[in-house]
Image (cartoon, coloured by chain):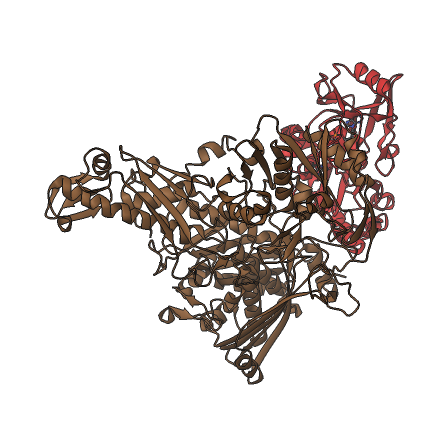
Amino acid sequence: MIPPTFDYLVPATLPEAIALLHEHGDEAKVLAGGHSLIPAMRLRFAEPSHLIDISHIPGLDYIREEGGFLKIGTMAREVVLEDLPWISERYPLLVDTTKMIADPQVRNLATVGGNLAHGDPANDHPATMLAYRAEIEIIGASGARTVPIDEFFTDFFTTALEHGEILSEIRIPIPPVLSGGCYLKVERKVGDYAAAAVAVQLSLAADGSIEQAGIGLTNVAALPTRAVNAEKALRGQQPSDALFAHVGELAADASSPADDLRGSAEYKLTLIRELTQRALRRSVERAQGRS
Amino acid sequence: MIMCKTSKEIGGMGHSLKRKEDARFIRGLGKYTDDVQLPGMLYMDIARSPFAYAKIKSIDKSVAMEIPGVLAVITGEDLKQYNLHWMPTLMSDTQMVLPTDTVMYQAQEVAAVIATDRYIAADAVQALENSIEYDSMKPIIDPHKALDADAPLLRPDKDGKTDNHIWHWQTGDEEATEKAFSEAEVVVKEQVYIPRIHVASIETCGCVASYEKAEGKLTVWMTTQAPHAIRTVIALVAGHVGLSEERIRIISPDIGGGFGGKVPVYPGYVIAIAASFLIGKPVKWIEDRSENLQADSFARDYHMTVELASTKEGKMTGLRIKTLADHGYTDAAANPSKFPSGLFSIVTGSYDIPTAFTEMDAVYTNKPPGGVAYRCSFRVTEAVHAIERITDVLAQKLGRDPADLRFQNFIQKDQFPYRSALGWEYDSGDYAPALRMAMDMVGYEELRKEQAEKRARGELMGIGISSFTEIVGAGPSKDFDILGIKMFDSAEVRIHPTGKAIARFGTKSQGQGHETTYAQILAEELGIPAMHIQIEEGDTDTAPYGLGTYASRSTPTAGAAAAKAAHKIRDKARKIAAYLLEVSEEDLEWEPGKFFVKGAPERSKTIQDIAFAAYTNHPQGMEAGLEATHYYDPPNLTFPFGSYICVMDIDPKTAEMKIRRFVAIDDCGNIINPMIVTGQIHGGLAMGIAPAMYEELIYDDDGNILNGTFMDYLLPTSVETPNWETGHTITPSPHHPLGAKGVAESPTVGAPPAVANAVVDALSHLGVTHVDIPVTPFKVWQILKEKGVIS
Ligand SMILES: Cc1cc2nc3c(=O)[nH]c(=O)nc-3n(C[C@H](O)[C@H](O)[C@H](O)COP(=O)(O)OP(=O)(O)OC[C@H]3O[C@@H](n4cnc5c(N)ncnc54)[C@H](O)[C@@H]3O)c2cc1C
């Protein structure tokens, strides 16, 4: 649990950080909150030659609504999301998710950007961002580009980030009125990654039917998973227990979990079925302003 | 109610004094072994085996020696030159310090690196680990297969060993028990497994060994619960290289949790000491978390077959238990010598069971050694789990309420001192009031009604009871020793001229609060304010000899020694007071803090006056000074007890479990510091639900540990722990000078069966009679699935 030698660099600006990444090549890594990277280094799973700490760059930790999006700067720490009343009110799915991540000590340092950039299907924000249909802004030597969340996770622990690029912002479309969301996670204890978890974000039409729905699943496949058929089955339908039970089945169909210490694949499918139904019920209640 | 004999200023027994040691602990100013920094200190790190069972083909030291800053690589062959490659265990088995040819478990020490820097040492270990070549062999992981005809012989080094059997141990009357079972109207039987768990103290193990060549003196700062015993062990095993006991000093500084895991001698200590001895410089070795979790002593790992016989009416008539104990590759448990399976024979528990018989067989496997008493007095957790689980199984079979069945079978108040079927003499107890108090606090009858209603609606809820009896305070010298050293403990008390005091003990606190409670005992007996009594432990050059702190033994032994030493001081103080007041000793009466003349209370001398006189104006012919030492040999153990009730809700769809209520009534005799006792109980309860719901060291068939970090070795946090509702009854120990019993471990032994019983109770209507701990949601889900509750 002692990492090998590395150099530690503290750029003052994003362009400087990007230049350092280019200068030091493949073996250099961005350091944000450090709560995924440093454990990996202590176990010598990751042995970067250089750590480029972006946490001292000013202006990367904003959270604001602007141009139709909730914009989250990559260095926004989980603890900040937990504590903003307007976020709790308008983005309950996001706050649910944050509160289920690790424990307060980790959340004091861990960042939303790092949670996504790590590309870990066991992390909680990926499913939530899938449900929100978020966009990711990436900055590289040649400027900024925007990647829809569906194209961001490309493989196990791999994202659309190229070497020399930095994830700069997460953009969540501001939900219309009559929207609600919910994150439900089964974990073995606080601080554990999900045995299975479900993120739901939906909006209702004036007649009470479901107009839009996003469903993301955590830790049930090699990549964060969108339950595409489950989402489709909801669209235009009136909420009902029967509908939700059916959608729960479809969410389970979208999952391909593995047996591990958290339980068997079959157990996790049961969890997805049940959590999906519960998250849908709660999301609808929230959209209707009932909770 | 707790009555105080002393004023708040004196702060004797019964006062909730704030812990004196917390002034440094809560400021982060504790001084732990890893805080020791010495000039020229070197760092040691250890290369470990990736295999559970393998022959070492080659170790290429050069890959590590090439790294700048690496001074030495030490292998088993190197230690063999000094005959230090094996060492004795506390149970008279032998354990490798470093292997010369075969590794016996994954993460076993294979070679050590000494370097000028901790990080360089780690780099060198990585290089070394990558270069060591092994021939791996099929290990024995399942203890049930250890005695198979085709099982490899794991310990060919042991003369005459032809199989992997370590020992057979039995107690009780086999024939009478056989008869009780053959005549029994009702018999229940269950296979009960108590898994392998780890003490997981926050501070890992380590030491700083410093051998000063000029003086020939070895000083070792060490994470040990038993510094004096360690000194003697080192003198005995390293005498041949010139270390004699007066030149060995063991200092046990602040300890970040011990729980039994810091009783054994680990190879790392011995290698660091050898390295310092050979190099002549201080060597620091501190394990990291994974090393601690994967290689240091485990606890439990008992496979028990438990049988209970009774009449149709529920009167228990016999208990029979057969156990297979997985000891890993050597018996390195930490039990008193005559008790290879510890005090497991407390297993008849709180019940008046006329006959009982237990037998166990210990076997070798390719796992780390241990079998330490993790926060339980030597295998008492296993015993309590067995009896409390099987009692519920019997209640279920008879269709009886489990509380009711307990009341029926409790040893009655007038039966104490009570001789159990397995030979213990319980000092005192009064079990029914504790259970009744717990039932009243939790609202037992209401809960049973609620449960019935919920069951009708398909909801799952369970109520689990555990009415345990502990056995602590080892122990009387006729039966209790470790490596021949009797299990007394000691106190040395000195009163200064201004009436303040210092007292030193053979025990060693690891969080128990000795600096406060011992001071309170002395305050109680001498009337000197506890604030002004300094307590020291852990330095073998200054403290009197003692066997250390574990198994809730400190208050029963060293606490009693403090009281006895104080009595000696009071005897002398009485003489001085008589001299000062010019009366005879018989004319004096004591109240905390002063002697006064009978019938003339205004004529008095305070303990402070007397202390001053002891140095300035002592009677002719009397020795000056005011001090005393006592080595206390307890006449018996003490038998704390309690009744716990756990209320568990289970989500019938996801099988998630939540402890809704947990009521704990404890009886530890007279209470020294109520706040500390409650704190110990809170901590112990958290440690009790941990193995019940979360903890287990898991190995695959090849002996790979699957959860060797805290990511997967699950410890509950404040989020998982419920709001503990605690209460007390007080039944003093008749033989302890203060009427006190041990307490810290009661909750750890009492809580697991309360949790397990609650879960089984929630599922009992489905025909479930037993679930092994840890009871996880996944396990419960499997049961619900099997029983068709979940499709
Ligand atoms: C005990 C513990 C429990 C945890 N439990 C959970 C949990 O339940 N759920 C959960 O979701 N997470 C959990 N985590 C992970 C935690 O939330 C992580 O810290 C987070 O996922 C990563 O954020 P970070 O800021 O710490 O990133 P870092 O560890 O600093 O970085 C992670 C990776 O992302 C890269 N990176 C970071 N920021 C950027 C960027 N802006 N641009 C490009 N690359 C970047 C780094 O180079 C690195 O490869 C846990 C962590 C711990 C230690």
Q: Position of residue B201 (x, y in %)?
A: 58, 44
Q: Position of residue B545 (x, y in %)?
A: 44, 47
**Chain A drawn in what color?**
red
Q: Which chain is brown?
A: B
Q: Assign the C terminus of chain B to one quadrant of the image.
A: bottom right
In the rendered view, tell whether residue B469 sits above or below residue B312.
above
Q: Position of residue B154 (x, y in %)?
A: 74, 60
Q: Is residue A175 visible?
A: no
In the rendered view, tell whether residue A288 sits above or below residue B162.
above
Left or right of B551, for residue A1: right
User: Farthest bottom residue?
Assistant: B183
Left or right of B692, for residue B520: left
Which one is in front, B636 or B99?
A: B99
**Ligand 1 shown in quarter:** top right
At horizontal 71% and vertical 28% (from top left) the residue drawn is A33
> Residue A84 occupies which quadrant of the picture?
top right
